[in-house]
Image: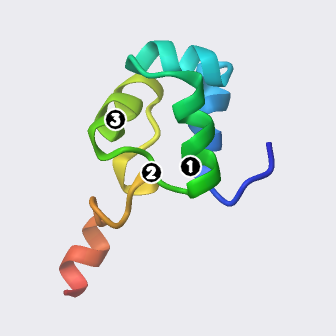
Amino acid sequence: MNTNYPALEKAIKIAGAQTKLSKAIGSSQQNISYWLRTGKVAPDKVILIEKATGVSRYELRPDIYPSEESKQAA
């Protein structure tokens, strides 16, 4: 994999493959592939990916879940 979405790539690597991640979160492999292309995980799947892989919601969707540092700076 070589996309512009390192957080999702990290989650896929931890899960073992796109298909394994998709099964862990109740989605399809096609959705995982789409998210890699678009650079955005569906909002309703972010927490599930975090629970399944340990990749933080802040890494996966910083537009929805800003880091603590970002919140304090605002």
Closer-to-camera residue (69/28): 28
Colouring of the image: rainbow
Closer-to-camera residue (70/25): 25
Type of the residue with mark 2: Leu
Q: Residue 49, image x and y in percent? A: 41, 31
User: Within 10 Å of the Cα at label 2, are there few (<14), some (14-19), or many (20+) other Cα atoms?
Assistant: many
Give the residue at mark 2. 60
Give the residue at mark 1. 7
Task: Give whichever of discs 2 and 1 has the lower sequence position.
Answer: 1
Q: Please name which of the two marks, 1 or 3, marks the residue nearer to the observer.
A: 3
Query: In the picture provided, is 54 more to the left or to the right than 32?
Result: left
Q: Look at the picture and state if 49 lies above or below 5.
A: above
Give the residue at mark 3. 45
- Residue at figure coordinates x 62%, y 17% from the top left: 19
User: Within 10 Å of the Cα at label 1, are there few (<14), some (14-19), or many (20+) other Cα atoms?
Assistant: some
Q: Which quadrant of the rendered structure holds the N terminus? A: top right
Q: Look at the picture and state if 15 lies above or below 43.
A: above
Type of the residue with mark 1: Ala
- Residue at figure coordinates x 30%, y 74% from the top left: 69
